[in-house]
């Protein structure tokens, strides 16, 4: 095995789950996420000799984000909610089924609200809250200044809160 290939695998493959998670949050489809990540990994491999820095994660996630954007070039994104498949087992020895049903329902509700956020807010929120990336790494992955990342996160959180509360008020009435 060539040295470059070993180096790429050692640096990039540990972040494959993060790449898939971001792709799935962006497109809402497991099948499309698979295609986007595959395309991103091929592009990352081809451009690996251009990678500079200590942490490949922001660079790789920027490629995933660009592949997602390119997959929708020329057509408008359908904003209808596409549920993410729940891959958990249907029967198991776990907590109370009612508690699980409420939790799953709230999870679907949260995913739907996040999916309805504008792309730049959704991306920043997922990278920070799901992938636990630093502001600096998010800025690198998105190509936005750190101030913009902070602003997008604040706006995303505010929109998320407002939409959640609006749905709560709608249910109560």
Image (cartoon, helix red, strand yellow):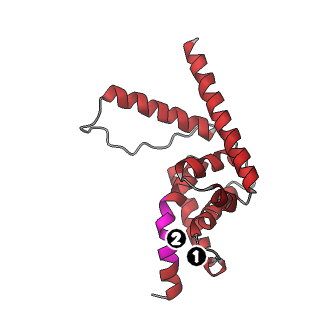
Question: Does residue 32 appear in the picture of this structure?
Answer: no
Quarter that holds the N terminus:
bottom left
**Image location of residue 165, percent across then percent down:** 61, 24
Secondary element type, mark 1:
helix
Distance from Cα at disc 2 to Cα at disc 1? 9 Å
User: What span is in magenta?
Assistant: 8-17
Relative to residue 146, is residue 77 depicted above or below?
above
- Whether the magenta-drawn stretch holds residue 33 is answered as no
Instruction: Determine which of the numbered discs, if any, sits on residue 162 in the image.
Output: none
**Image location of residue 99, percent across then percent down:** 36, 28
Q: Residues within 10 Å of mark 1 (few under 14, many from 20)?
A: some
Residue 49: quadrant of the picture = bottom right
Q: Mark 2 points at which residue?
A: 12
Q: Name the residue under label 1.
A: 45
Looking at the image, which residue is at 60% across and 62% down?
Answer: 61
Give the side of residue 145 with respect to residue 20, left or right. right
Give the side of residue 36 with respect to residue 108, left or right. right
Q: How crowded is mark 2: few (under 14 residues within 10 Å), some or many (20 or more)?
A: many
C-beta proximity under 8 Å, tags 2 and 1: yes
Mark in front: 2 vs 1: 2
């Amino acid at each position: 095995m060539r040295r470059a290939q070993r180096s790429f695998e050692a640096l990039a493959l540990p972040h494959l789950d993060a790449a898939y998670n971001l792709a799935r949050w962006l497109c809402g489809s497991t099948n499309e996420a698979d295609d986007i990540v595959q395309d991103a990994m091929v592009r990352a491999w081809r451009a690996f000799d251009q990678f500079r820095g200590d942490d490949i994660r922001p660079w790789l996630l920027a490629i995933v984000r660009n592949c997602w954007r390119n997959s929708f070039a020329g057509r408008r994104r359908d904003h209808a909610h596409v549920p993410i498949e729940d891959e958990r087992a249907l029967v198991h020895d776990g907590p109370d089924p009612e508690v699980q049903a409420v939790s799953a329902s709230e999870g679907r509700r949260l995913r739907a609200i996040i999916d309805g956020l504008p792309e730049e807010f959704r991306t920043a929120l997922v990278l920070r809250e799901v992938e636990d990336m630093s502001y600096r790494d998010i800025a690198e992955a998105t190509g936005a200044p750190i101030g913009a990342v902070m602003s997008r996160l604040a706006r995303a959180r505010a929109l998320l809160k407002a939409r959640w509360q609006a749905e709560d008020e709608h249910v109560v009435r």
